[in-house]
Image (tube, grey):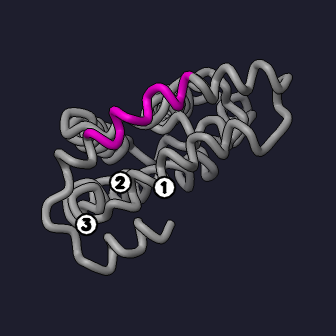
Amino acid sequence: PASGTTAATGTAADSSFTTLAHAIIDDYMARRPSAATDLGVHKYDDRIEDASQAAIQAESKALTDFRAKLAAIDTSRLSEVNRADREFLIRSMDAGLLADDVIRRWAKDPDAYSGAITNAAYTIMKRNFAPAADRLKSLIARERLMPATLAEARKNLANPPKIYTQIAIEQ
């Protein structure tokens, strides 16, 4: 949400929306540590994305719950900026649900896993946001979690298309 939106309108609806939007963003960052790092949030630098079926199902449930809360908001009581942010967040929830529940890349694309772990390393090292020794410590913590991600890939992948497998190998 745009900074200052709640202060500018001062409505209870704007305040409630902002609280919900922050919860959605916090949830996203916790589930996507590499994205958080890339966006400058370093709270999760020692973690990587959880690729387990339980995590995928939990994310789908969270997206469904957040979407329902967003849809229930009376937009006539929101500022124009928060109405736009609400629509953006609803579409983001829809995109996440489409990815998790319909497209299901996690079930058919090996590169989703190999790419995720290499990106987890890259996001730590690509910028000098902290001393090299601190970033290396976070990188080592992430590297220790990588075998578990690959183990989840072995569980989750079901007859991936040959071309997806070839691309993953080439990567």
The residue shown at (25%, 78%) is 162
Q: Which residue lies furthest to the bottom in this view?
A: 163
Q: What is the C-alpha distance between the residues marked 1 and 2?
A: 18 Å
Question: CB under 8 Å between callouts 3 and 2?
Answer: no
Q: Residue 29: x and y, percent?
A: 52, 34
The residue shown at (66%, 46%) is 122
Residue type indicated by callout 3: Ile
The residue shown at (74%, 39%) is 125
Q: Earlier in the sequence, mark 1 or mark 2?
A: 2
Q: Residue 171: x and y, percent?
A: 50, 66
Residue type indicated by callout 1: Gly
The residue shown at (72%, 35%) is 40
Q: What is the C-alpha distance between the residues marked 3 and 2?
A: 10 Å
Q: Which of 77 and 29 is in front in this view?
A: 29
Residue 29 numbered tag? none
Which segment did they paint magenta? 141-151
Residue identifier under label 3? 103
Q: Is 33 left, or right, of 55 in this rendering? A: right
- Quarter of the image for residue 6 reads top right
Residue 96 numbered tag? 2
Residue identifier under label 1? 115
Q: Earlier in the sequence, mark 1 or mark 3?
A: 3
Q: Which of 95 and 11 is in front in this view?
A: 95
Residue type indicated by callout 2: Gly
Residue 69 can be seen in this image: no
Q: Is mark 3 on a helix, strand or loop?
A: helix
Q: Residue 71: x and y, percent?
A: 32, 47
Mark toward the viewer: 1 or 2: 1
Question: CB under 8 Å between callouts 1 and 2?
Answer: no
**Magenta stretch containing residue 147, yes or no?**
yes
Q: Which of 42 and 83 is in front in this view?
A: 42
